[in-house]
Amino acid sequence: MKKRNVIILILLSVLIIGIGMVVIYSYQPNSQFKDVTIMESELPEEENEDLEKEQEDEQTEQESASETEQKPLSEIVVNVVESTLDFFSRETHVSAIGDSLTQGVGSINEQGGYVGILDRSINKEEDLVAFDNLGIRGNRSDQLLARLEDPEVVDSIHQSDIVLITIGANDIMQVVKENFTNLKMEDFDEARDSYEDRLRQIFSKIHDISPKSQIYLLGFYDPFSKYFREIKELSVIVEEWNGTSRKVTEELDNTMFIPTTDLFAGAEANLFSEDNFHPNDKGYKRIAKRVLEYLTSEEG
């Protein structure tokens, strides 16, 4: 066990350095991101014509395979909206609360992340749904729980028919920051138990404020799999925390878990912003489409 913990410590120490850079970068008030494009490999100049032809064929295949990613927003998300528009009424009110994923950090072309995409898509022709984006970068579950006493948040939820939540990623980061000199898997297990307790309190408070509201909790995706595939513990942590989130939602009425891990796993397109942690516009479009599917499904 000691040997395993030492290995985990060494591997996660590397991760901590990267996280530190991400945190510093993401907290710059005027951070700018470049336009997002699908990553393409470049061949050296000395490659022969056959390889150049092969590259052209491969590029054609990639463009065909990623056609969905390149389509305008109206064809990616609005198509789903048009087939399910009757789900919404003029009185529908959506409150989005949580962390940077709700706020939309990493988005540039589509301001407001997945919430902004949903807003513009659903309300393209006429105002059908009112959206409140109350996401705050860096929020942990304990901070979100405290914010449920904020009159602005309470008023929004009181009016809401739907509450969308992203929370928990910063709880995981807090474990790393507080235990980086002696980090163990047990630290994440203990923090996950506390996260579960707070999650139940969050849902309970929301239902107290607005019993009619349907709550949707978005699951974690794995931002580390692309660069840290060899560190299996990271995937285990994400999977276990998602399992806890799902378990809590399944035990409660009017509460549903929306998975997102599969949206990013093994994707050829670049779905992350320059910090390699938050989604870019392509990533947020995938999340928005998934959320919309759940909002308009019979189960939802």
Image (cartoon, helix red, strand yellow):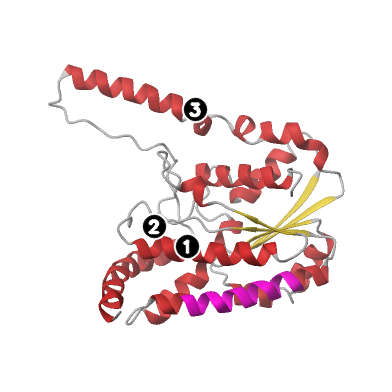
Q: Is residue 269 above or below residue 72?
A: below
Was residue 74 drawn as part of the magenta stretch in this picture? no
Residue 201 within the segment the image draws in magenta: yes
Q: Amino acid at mark 3?
A: Glu
- Residue 127 shows in the view: no
Earlier sequence position, callout 2 versus callout 3: 3
* Residue 90 image offset from top left, x and y in percent: 86, 44
Q: Which residues are magenta?
A: 189-204
Q: Position of residue 178 (x, y in %)?
A: 42, 81
Rounded to the nearest angstrom, the CA distance separating label 1 from label 3 is: 30 Å
Q: Which residue carries the number 3 mark?
A: 67
Please state the horizontal and vertical placement of residue 235, each as a whole percent of the image: 41, 60
Residue drawn where x is 20% and y is 22% of the image: 51
According to the picture, the residue beneath numbered tag 1 turns out to be 238
Name the image quarter holding residue 133.
bottom right
Neighbour class for label 2 at 10 Å: few (<14), some, many (≥20)? Answer: some
Question: Residue at point 55% right, 29% down?
Answer: 71
Asked if residue 229 shows in the view, the reply is: yes
Quick check: 226 left or right of 74?
A: left
What residue is shown with label 2? 224
